[in-house]
Amino acid sequence: MKTSLKHIFRGGNAGLKVVDLTHPLDENIPIWPGDSEFKLAARASYEKDGYLTHSLAVGEHSGTHWSTPNTFVPGGRHAGMFTPQELVVPAVVMDIRAKTCQDRDYCLTVEDVTAWEAVYGEIPLGSLVVLFTGWQERWNDSCSFFGLDRENTMHWPGFGRDAVIHLVEERKIAGLGTDTHGIDPGNDGAFKASGAIFRADKIVLECLAGLDGLPAVGAMLVIGGLPLNGGTGSPARVLGLLGLGRIY
């Protein structure tokens, strides 16, 4: 039987709002030091071939992207192994901009999670927890976005390892997201938060945009990550859906 949105969402989609959480891809995007450069090259033209096509070269973890457990865990699930159901998840957004404007290396703590829940309620099971640091506003300035200092250390806020373990074990989250280039603080070369979330077989979203358009609770994310067999992620179109109501 053919299914319509009216059969999926109670009340239809009249109140549906879509928030684009994706930075456009081009040659000016901030690239992780040493990673592949973005290249879009014409392979056919209207004048010669009657149509236009390009070849595309871009790192798996460039632009707005998703990352999978095999990024850090040998034998962990790769980007071709996640089901469609795992890529449509409820989101909660933790806005820590008031703290990151004072400390660019700020690390989310268990106490921060507890304080957030005191205001918005317990994080629903299966949610993807998004950290809104304000770094999305730095996207067009690579120097500011990476915060590289004279010792070649990067600086941006992120999740603390203890907070990640708490979210995984106590709230059974689906994954983590952030508007920076990594869920770990930029100065954490041990990638402790990444190790914790990937060992728990969860996904990560990085370089998100448009987080000011999402509420603290109530959005549904659609993660358009490429199913690359053996891949550790890919650039992704990430959309936030608001006003869905009850999902049957």
Image (cartoon, rainbow, N blue to C red):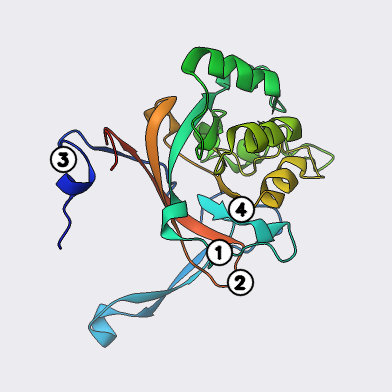
Query: Which residue is under mark 1?
Result: 79
Query: Which residue is under mark 4?
Result: 31
- Residue 74 located left or right of residue 9: right
Query: Which residue is under mark 2?
Result: 230
Query: Which residue is under mark 3?
Result: 12
State the image quarter where residue 67 is shown: bottom right
Q: CA distance from mark 1 to mark 4?
A: 21 Å
Q: CA distance from mark 3 to mark 2?
A: 38 Å
| Marks 2 and 1 close (CB-CB < 8 Å) | yes
Tag 1: residue type? Ala
In this rendering, which labeled residue sits more in front, label 1 or label 3? Answer: 3
Residue drawn 53% across the image and 34% down it: 130
Secondary structure, mark 3, is loop
Residue 157 in the image, given as x and y percentages of width and height: 67, 31
State the image quarter where residue 99 is shown: top right
Tag 3: residue type? Gly
